[in-house]
Amino acid sequence: MKIGIIGAGNIGGNLTRRLTALGHEVSVANSRGPQTLSALAEETGATPVTVGEAARGAEIVVVTVPLKNVPDLPPGLFGEAAEGFALIDTCNYYPHQRDGRIAGIEDEGLTESRWTERQLGHPVVKAFNGTFAQDILERHRPAGAPDRMALPVAGDDEAAKKAVRALIDELGFDTVDSGGLDDSWRQQPGTPVYGLREGVEAVTRALAEASPVRTEAFQG
């Protein structure tokens, strides 16, 4: 499968490592340009590209950048993506530590991924946002393993969500459908499932226990 990854930080870099190891054709981009990705490309066999080229021909695109930088992504970003491609949003809102106050989230009450979807102009599937980057490399397990972790996945496009859940399964993790994007507050920072390293039952329970009221640490 052809996969484009926009953002080569901890999550983007480790997804590049695992997906290339599984035999996928990965194009990876960051804000500093493909020349800064030569080491990752040499390590993994991924193709370093510009941000504008990352989605070209891709069946799945991953956007994993600081939330405040999402509006700065170039227009027409997905014009050359494969028809029916799925768009994964891994981003989190950290108003105090990094992103500043985002009005659409604070004043309109949008979930982080609904806000991101509006900026990108394409339906998104929220996944990996509460996953420790190192776990992508170290905690994958075969299906049925008793210690296999589960990741929550939210989105409105059922076909895209199905594709993303299948990819996560291939990566070595179970998934739990956490609803549509307007329900994705259940997996935002500060919720019980955020950073949870447990299986399907515990993740399902944590999603049910979430509160829509942001903790003070994640209020802008």
Image (tube, helix red, strand yellow):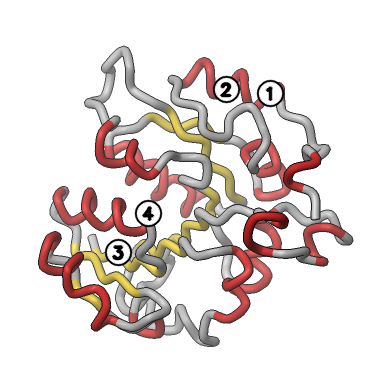
Which residue is the site of mark 2? 204
Count numbered badges in the picture: 4
Determine contact: label 1, label 2, CB under 8 Å. yes
CA–CA distance in space, label 1 to label 2: 6 Å
Q: Name above or below for residue 57 compared with residue 191.
A: below
Where residue 63 appears, as percent x and y from the top left, is 46, 64
Which residue is the site of mark 3? 3
CA–CA distance in space, label 2 to label 4: 26 Å
Q: Which residue is depicted at the point 19% across and 58% down?
A: 24
Which residue is the site of mark 4? 10
Crowd around label 3: few <14 · some 14–19 · many ≥20 (10 Å): many
Q: Earlier in the sequence, mark 3 or mark 2?
A: 3
**Residue 49: quarter of image:** bottom left
Which residue is the site of mark 1? 208
Secondary structure category for the residue under label 1: helix
Where residue 55 appears, as percent x and y from the top left, is 37, 75
Q: Earlier in the sequence, mark 1 or mark 3?
A: 3
Q: Residue furthest top?
A: 146
Secondary structure category for the residue under label 3: strand
